Amino acid sequence: MPGSEHHQARGPQHAAERLAGLGEREWWIDQPGMGDDAQELAETGMAQRAGPSASSISRAPARRCWASSSRCAYTRMFVSTAITRGLPSARRGYPGLGNPVGIGLANEIDTGMAMRTIMYAFGASVQDQEHNLVLGGKPTLEAVKFVKALFQEAMTPEVFTWDASSNNRAMIAGRVSLALNAISITRTAEKDNPDMSGKIQLTKALQGPARAIGLEHVMQCYVAWKFAENIDGAKQFLVDYTSDFRQAFRAGEFYDFPCFPNTVPDLKTLIANDPEAHPPDKYTVLGDVTEWATNVGYPGYANAAIDEIFGTWVINVMFAKAASGSATPEEALREAEVAAKRIFGKWKEKGLV
């Protein structure tokens, strides 16, 4: 796994030298014991470009970046962005590498989603399909080591203090090359910075050693309070809203995808020609997003324990401690596992897991 002194010394510069020769969906990085060979994105899950040919990267002008994100299934999908070339390096000690990666390592929602996306790509998860805690396995450790290496080689310390909108602002300002976010980045750019909007493009979830899977950003749930004055009206509204979702899909600018695909039968046609997008077919990549989207309880259902682990930033802290060096990856994982066991135990006693 990335994360050794070997990577700190050679990995970033070696990657930069070979970036122009990348094939589609590849990211080259030195691996211990691999000499000068490279490993594809499918084995590292590190980053991906979106474009018709490998040479698109090397010919891209300054501020050209490839980005990715979406929302889906009444969710706000958490996908990925890719690579900026030609911008001044913000990574001390690595001149000429371009802008740093913009993935948060803070106690905020975007970090929580990003770290789980990476975990899932490595075959890790908080729980299994039967809702048993499995956080402490080798796949999680490999994911933690990967993020540690990613921070050391391609990120800056500011990510430890980010809030949920920091990656939006950094991408739109042209200061980062990659972010994992909902389409708020691209939609904000279209309104506030059309020039930058054309330089931010989308890609699907990135392939890791185990899978390529995106994480929902917000899963919407609806209730009608027992004390509501018009419960029947509220229920009817939700039926109308859900069964005729095409209006909501268009008005919401594709942030929320339908739970029931037949409620937006021309979805792919709509996203293939959006007059606000630069270019108009930018969102075509989301046409099959419901096939590679999941929830925070993956591969099981979200439950009370999963919610508390998310809301108390157990996973965020694990990755941040390892990346910052305040704990080894093994120590950070053990601490997170202890916290997760306590939380799962509490909710199992209540019969809610």
Image (cartoon, grey):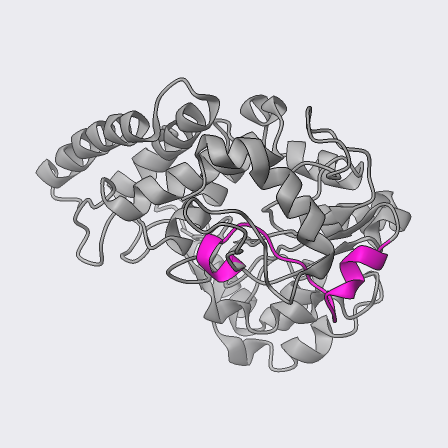
Quarter of the image where one finds residue 2? top left
Q: Is residue 257 above or below residue 128?
A: below
- Residue positioned 73% across, 39% down in the render: 97
Percent across and percent down for residue 38 are: 53, 56
> Which residue in the rendered view is the most extreme toward the top?
326
Frontmost residue, 227 versus 218: 218
Q: Residue at x 71, y 71 (%)?
A: 271
Q: Is residue 142 left or right of residue 191?
A: left
Point 75% across, 39% down: residue: 98
Queried whether the magenta region covers residue 1, the answer comes back as no
Q: Position of residue 15 (x, y in %)?
A: 63, 46
Closest to the observer: 60 or 237? Answer: 60
Q: Which residue is pictured at 79% across the width and 63% down the height?
A: 56
Magenta-highlighted residues: 41-60
x and y percentages locating residue 202 in the rendered image: 68, 59
Magenta run includes residue 59? yes
Q: Is residue 102 visible?
A: no
Q: Is residue 91 left or right of residue 275?
A: left
Instruction: Measuring from the top left, give residue 301's x and y in whole percent.
Output: 29, 55
Quadrant location of the N terminus in the rendered image: top left
Q: Outermost residue, front direction? A: 35
Q: Is residue 115 above or below residue 164?
A: below
Q: Is residue 292 left or right of residue 241?
A: left
Relative vertical location of residue 95 with respect to residue 217 in this rendering, above or below: above
Q: Is residue 13 visible?
A: yes
Q: Is residue 73 left or right of residue 97?
A: left
Q: How many marks do you count on the picture?
A: 0
